[in-house]
């Protein structure tokens, strides 16, 4: 059974940092995949944050580029979202999600959470000004 569990959320002041973790179980890491991070603030649309793929390549939304970094530890089967220079507008529930990536496909094409097969329950991030 596939399970994704996020952790690491919390409350910090603007300018601070947080590192979110997404512990994955039941997944086959040898397959081609996209691991995405998404967020949703109250009364706002869900937003794609970025991805990392099996090869370690990553991509980011313009709103977080240069501040957030997605990485992975294959041995620990854990994905990370390092968030620096946090802003109040980064306040949201953050989700990780996983999907298989067909040969030749690009994770840039998968920026809708509905296109992912598995997702976690989320972890809350609150940034105060």
Image: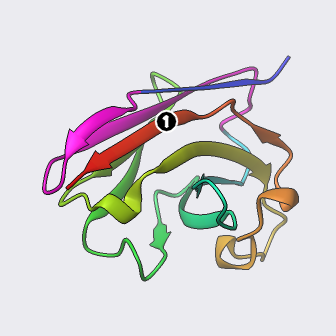
How far from the left and from the top, in percent, is residue 88? 31, 59
Name the residue located 77 percent from the left edge and 67 percent from the top edge.
112
Q: Point out the image quarter for the C terminus.
A: bottom left
Q: Residue furthest left?
A: 15
User: Which of these two is toward me, 86 or 34?
Assistant: 86
Name the residue located 61 percent from the left edge and 34 percent from the top edge.
122
Residue 16 is covered by the magenta coloring: yes
Q: What element carries label 1?
A: strand
Q: Point out the image quarter for the N terminus.
A: top right
In the image, residue 87 sits, relative to residue 71, either above or below, namely: below
- The residue pinned by badge 1 equals 124
Residue 98 is covered by the magenta coloring: no
How far from the left and from the top, in percent, is residue 3? 74, 22
Residue 17 lies left or right of residue 32; in this view the side is left
User: Which of these two is toward me, 108 or 29?
Assistant: 108
What color scheme is it?
Answer: rainbow
Q: How many labels does the image show?
A: 1
User: Within 10 Å of the Cα at label 1, are there few (<14), some (14-19), or many (20+) other Cα atoms?
Assistant: some
Name the residue located 67 percent from the left edge and 60 percent from the top edge.
43
Q: Residue furthest bottom?
A: 62
In the image, residue 59 sits, relative to residue 126, either above or below, namely: below
Name the residue located 45 percent from the left edge and 24 percent from the top edge.
75
Residue 129 lies left or right of residue 70; in this view the side is left
How far from the left and from the top, in percent, is residue 22? 53, 32
How far from the left and from the top, in percent, is residue 34? 67, 56
In the image, residue 114 sits, relative to residue 16, either above or below, namely: below
Question: Which quadrant of the structure image shows residue 102?
Answer: bottom right
User: Which of these two is toward me, 73 or 51?
Assistant: 51
Q: Please state the extent of the stretch shown in magenta in the rendering.
A: 8-29
């Amino acid at each position: 059974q596939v399970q994704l569990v996020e952790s690491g959320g919390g409350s910090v002041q603007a300018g601070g940092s947080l590192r979110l973790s997404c512990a994955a179980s039941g997944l086959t890491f040898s397959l081609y995949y996209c691991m995405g991070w998404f967020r949703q603030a109250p009364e706002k649309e869900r937003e794609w944050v970025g991805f990392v793929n099996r090869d370690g390549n990553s991509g980011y939304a313009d709103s977080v580029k240069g501040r957030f970094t997605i990485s992975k530890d294959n041995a620990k089967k854990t994905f990370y979202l390092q968030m620096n220079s946090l802003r109040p507008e980064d306040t949201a529930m953050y989700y990780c999600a996983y999907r298989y990536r067909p040969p030749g496909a690009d994770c840039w094409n998968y920026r809708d959470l509905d296109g992912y097969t598995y997702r976690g329950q989320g972890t809350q991030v609150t940034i105060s000004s």
